[in-house]
Amino acid sequence: TQLLEQSPQFLSIQEGENLTVYCNSSSVFSSLQWYRQEPGEGPVLLVTVVTGGEVKKLKRLTFQFGDARKDSSLHITAAQPGDTGLYLCAAYNTGKLIFGQGTTLQVKP
Amino acid sequence: DAGVIQSPRHEVTEMGQEVTLRCKPISGHNSLFWYRQTMMRGLELLIYFNNNVPIDDSGMPEDRFSAKMPNASFSTLKIQPSEPRDSAVYFCASRTSGRETQYFGPGTRLLVL
């Protein structure tokens, strides 16, 4: 059983569409991170959210931390082919960073 | 600044052979992590070091896996003997202790035939 459950696992959309990726858990976290991983590379940190209800924006990406700090979402507006990649949520549990299974996003031109 | 450096980037070997993966963390970082990524299990922490000392190796799958960090700028992950189920991408990451951001290397893609 994954401590962090991501959905959907796969998403294939056309350029210009909007999408939302979810990261859910039954545990409460002090913070939650989102990474993007491109083929052949390691994950790269996009953002860390730390406060319940917090919303952070990174250009066309909007990240939200749930009020109870158990879940998070990533919304992409007007997706572009350059957004293609694996999106991972992660959180520290007993001092170790654990990851969700990831959402593979493909944005077709 | 150079990021985390891993070598080799790709490794193909036969079952039973010894495999050594190498990592150079970012200079000044004192925590180092080894992860394994597979389609089935995702990204899993194998072991991590603080100030060159192994802190938690509970993620190491079995005795065939071992990791060392002889100094602050070098770590190895060794598999002996290797098995086909060890095929995966192995990542090294580093960070400054107390900071939450980990920086990942490009990974070593291992294929055991």
Image (spheres, helix red, strand yellow):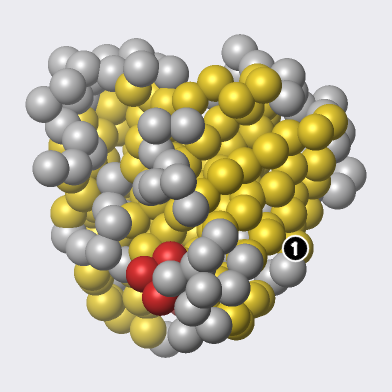
Locate residue B17, reporting x and y percent.
59, 73
Tell me where residue B18 sits by quadrant: bottom right
Q: Which amino acid does label 1 sit on?
A: Ser
Q: Which residue is drawn at 35% across and 75% down?
A: A106
Residue pointed to by mark 1: B7
Q: Residue at x 29, y 46 (%)?
A: A100
Q: Which of B60 and A40 is in front in this view?
A: B60
Q: Which of A68 and B51 is in front in this view?
A: B51
Q: In this view, does A30 lie to the left or right of B33?
A: left
Q: Residue at x 51, y 50 (%)?
A: B65
Q: What element carries label 1?
A: strand
Q: In this view, does B83 lie to the left or right of B79?
A: left
| Above-or-below relation of B93 to B106 | above
Q: Which of B1 and A49 is in front in this view?
A: B1
| Above-or-below relation of B105 to A30 | below
Locate residue B102, reporting x and y percent.
59, 35
Q: Residue at x 88, y 44 (%)?
A: B1
Q: Is residue A47 left or right of residue B52?
A: left
Q: Is residue B111 left or right of residue A68?
A: right
Which of the chains bears the disc numbered 1? B
Q: Is residue B6 visible?
A: yes
